[in-house]
Image (cartoon, helix red, strand yellow):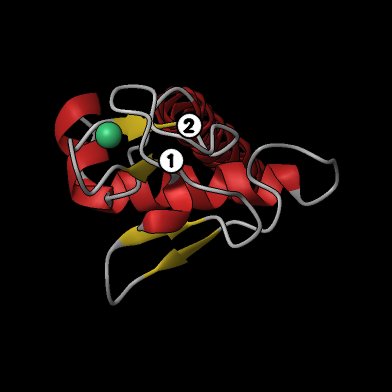
């Protein structure tokens, strides 16, 4: 009889621990997914490129912010999305969008203008005069 338990107990323990690990991993992935969506929205809706600033505003630690951005970039690799071609510059701790035109700041009045506007919305100075 004892020989049965010697086999049954380890088998039960194996399945229980496998289930616990599975739940833990699913929750961890879920958390990265959620943080990734928060960070993605934050970056898309603003000019925020600095990892440190994104971390401060979102309340997500820097290392998790990096994971969240990496996850957003990975998800976009299959589809044409905002984060296609984006990467993290670890020296500058910034997200880089190589193909995207960024907003520009007028040298005369410091107003921030969207890339498609060629003359400053505030003082009409041309972007080319920069
Ligand atoms: Zn201006």
Image quadrant occupied by the C terminus: bottom left
Find residue 108 and report its horizontal and vertical position in percent.
19, 43
Q: Which residue is mark 2?
A: 114
Of pointers 2 and 1, the one earlier in the residue sequence: 1
Find residue 47 and report its horizontal and vertical position in percent.
37, 36
For ligand 1, tell me if the residue under mark 1 lies within 8 Å. no
What residue is at 17 percent from the left and 35 percent from the top?
Answer: 109
Q: Circle 2: is it few (<14), some (14-19), or many (20+) Cα within 10 Å?
A: some
What is the spatial separation of the Cα atoms under label 2 and label 1, in whole angstroms? 5 Å
Q: Secondary structure at mark 2?
A: loop
As rendered, which of 2 and 23 lies closer to the eye? 23
Q: Circle 1: is it few (<14), some (14-19), or many (20+) Cα within 10 Å?
A: some
Ligand 1: image quarter: top left
**For residue 81, side relative to residue 106 (left or right):** right
CB atoms at circles 2 and 1 under 8 Å apart? yes
What residue is at 59 percent from the left and 56 percent from the top?
Answer: 86
Q: Quadrant of residue 81?
A: top right
Residue 78 seen in the figure: yes
Q: Which residue is mark 1?
A: 103
Find residue 90 and report its horizontal and vertical position in percent.
34, 72
What residue is at 19 percent from the left and 27 percent from the top?
Answer: 57
**For residue 13, side relative to residue 7 (left or right):** left
Using the image, determine if residue 90 lies above or below residue 66.
Answer: below
What residue is at 47 percent from the left and 55 percent from the top?
Answer: 128
**For residue 89, side relative to residue 11 (left or right):** left
**For residue 75, side relative to residue 6 (left or right):** right
As rendered, which of 67 and 4 lies closer to the eye? 67
Q: Quadrant of residue 98?
A: bottom right
Find residue 52 and report its horizontal and vertical position in percent.
18, 49
Residue 1 seen in the figure: no
């Amino acid at each position: 009889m004892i020989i049965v338990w010697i086999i049954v107990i380890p088998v039960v323990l194996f399945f229980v621990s496998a289930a616990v690990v599975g739940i833990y991993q699913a929750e961890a992935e879920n958390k990265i997914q959620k943080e990734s969506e928060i960070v993605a929205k934050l970056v898309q809706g603003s000019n925020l490129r600095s990892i440190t600033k994104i971390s401060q505003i979102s309340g997500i630690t820097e290392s998790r912010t990096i994971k969240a951005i990496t996850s957003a970039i990975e998800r976009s690799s299959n589809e044409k999305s905002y984060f296609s071609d984006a990467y993290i510059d670890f020296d500058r701790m910034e997200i880089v969008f190589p193909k995207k035109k960024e907003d520009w700041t007028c040298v005369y009045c410091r107003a921030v203008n969207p890339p498609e506007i060629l003359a400053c919305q505030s003082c009409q100075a041309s972007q080319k005069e920069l």
